[in-house]
Image (spheres, coloured by chain):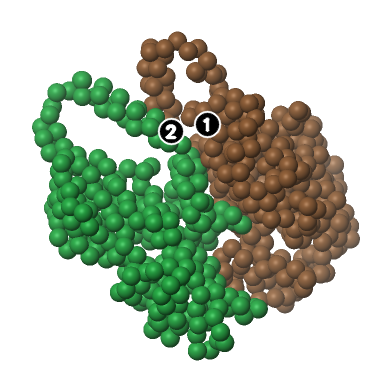
Chain colours: A green, B brown
Amino acid sequence: MIFSIKNKVATLALLTFLTSCSSDDDSQMASGNGEMELYFDNSVNGDNLILGASTYTNSNNETLKINRFNYIVSNFVLIKEDGTEVVYDKESSYFIISEEAQLNTINLENIPAGKYTKIRFGLGVDQQRYLQGETAQQSFWDLADANNMTWTWSTGYRFINFEGTFTAPTLTGEKTFQVHQGSNTATDNYREITVTLPNTARVRTNESPSVHFIADANKILDGNSKIKLSEAMNLAGTSASVMGGEKLMTIAGNTTSMFVVDHVHAGGAEH
Amino acid sequence: MKKIFFFSILSVLFSCQNDDSDYIEINENLEFNIPDNFPDLAQDISLNYPTKKGFELGRKLFYDGRLSRDGTISCAFCHEQSSAFTHHGHDFSHGIDNLIGNRNTPAIQNLAFQSDYFYDGASNSLEMISIVPIHNAVEMDETLPNIVQKLKQDPTYVKLFAQAFENREITTGNTLKALGQFMTMMVSSNSRYDKYVRNESGGNLNSQELQGLNLFQSKCASCHATDLFADNSFKNNGLPANPFLNDLGREVVTGFETDRYKFKVPSLRNVELTAPYMHDGRFGSLQSVLNFYASGVSHSETLDPILNQNGVLGIPISASEKEAIIAFLKTLTDQEYINNPLFYFQT
């Protein structure tokens, strides 16, 4: 699959070369292209997220220990201060953020120079792209599968895989929980999220800013709407699972406030 | 189309640089025709348009047991051509390690005309559909990445994938695409009924079959609609739930209680060959199916309203009407489909 991506890049490069031969208009070239880094810092309720270690109590009075927090972000659109939108190449615009695999950083390439003040992106995989199957997704299914982000009893992606253990006042002892957010053939739970940057991200050919996102895992169950794990127990009473129905639509709503941009590093700086 | 265009540019440039004559193999698009009496396609087949090499590769994969964990269960194990690609004689299909599933194997035919797959609609993409049986622990119990590793050991597959796909690689995506191309081409449209409605030779229905067709249109065609004899919907047809299975049907996928006990309306094409019937294969004959609709429909919250009119459950059908409907249903058998050598792979 890497080969095929290279092919495409090569193709584009060739095309670009051919185009530039036939035209010597370089007024557009003056500003050039640069890169932008997006860093996803996973947190829970204002604290660092440390998998399998710390516990926290949410406003439902349930105490969670998180063992897994993976999600898919996609379809990035970078918005300049004058409102101009730069849509990142859709073929290359699907990414997995995984706390356990330490996948936290996305590098966006070939970004036109400019001052960016907002970013819009999707949480999950849009239905249009999903229905195009592997034709469009390239090797994304493999990457998703390797990170526990696919379903196999049905076809589709987990948009969020949020797992761990918890205790609740109404339950005895510690139980496991699995929250698998996604779409199915009945409901489209893909959502777009727009974040405002607290300071401008300036892209130049030699300036690659880094945008520092904070993702709050608590928002999944304890956002604008509340979901109690203790009300999603299996028949045996051993485990809570949230994988379908109304709850996924509720989570979709909650996730629109799951992300904020904390700060933007100017080009070249470290975190 | 864009990709094909790019690829041709690359090919030209590459061929300028070297004369490696086997870089480009001959592959060609297959012809896909929508039968005159069929509705529109429900899948966008242009996204994975069948080519000769892709189709042939998909067929080889379909008949290859290496797609299962222990090499014993191919797709064709449960989808046999002679019974319209169902598992004849089994209410529940048995898969790997002789484990038994909890649903009756559905027919593989005219998939590109369907919007959702499996009795519960677990997939809506023809290209992704194979993921489900491959990973199911009681069917093939394998993973796509493992399959790719196995196929890469086989020089024949290395060659066939290279011929079928422009990136020439054995990948999970190309494996799914090849299977998708094979299944896209699996169109059954030449039954005696089809020839009758298209005014083709061999399309003669006798008076009982014509009576059955009329009865079918008034009593059955609201769900078994169009010449696909299905309407791409999920319905609770009033089967009393089997308490040992408690298969919730569509609710399993959607999580909505309003979808409880709803199952996909199946096509009735080749129905003579696809016994047993219903999602759990509980009925062994078409006679039993019609007996059920006439007098066995049971009430529950999600029962389709069409089967509960004015407090009467089911569909009134007399004994002679049942015989006529069954005579008509048998005209939907497509001998050309079940004998088509294109869909049979001989090693």
Chain assignment, label 1: B
Q: Residue at x 72, y 52 (%)?
A: B139
Quarter of the figure with the C terminus of chain A: bottom left
Q: Position of residue A181 (x, y in %)?
A: 47, 64
Mark 1: few/some/many CA within 10 Å (<14, 14-19, 20+): many
> Under tag 1, what secondary structure?
loop
Q: Position of residue A99 (x, y in %)?
A: 40, 61
> Under tag 2, what secondary structure?
helix
Q: Residue at x 42, y 19 (%)?
A: B11
Q: Work out whether A16 lies above or below A139.
A: above
Q: Residue at x 44, y 48 (%)?
A: A129
- Residue A81 disc label: none
In the image, B32 versus B121, the foreground residue is B121
Q: Position of residue B45 (x, y in %)?
A: 53, 38
Residue beneath label 2, please? A4
In the image, B222 versus B46, the foreground residue is B46
Residue beneath label 1, please? B169
Asked if residue A183 lies left or right of residue B322, the reply is: left
Q: Residue at x 63, y 26 (%)?
A: B155
Residue B21 visible at all = yes
Number of callouts in the render?
Answer: 2
Residue contact at pointers 1 and 2, CB within 8 angstroms: yes
The image quadrant of residue B54 is top right
In the image, B202 versus B76, the foreground residue is B76
The image quadrant of residue B231 is bottom right
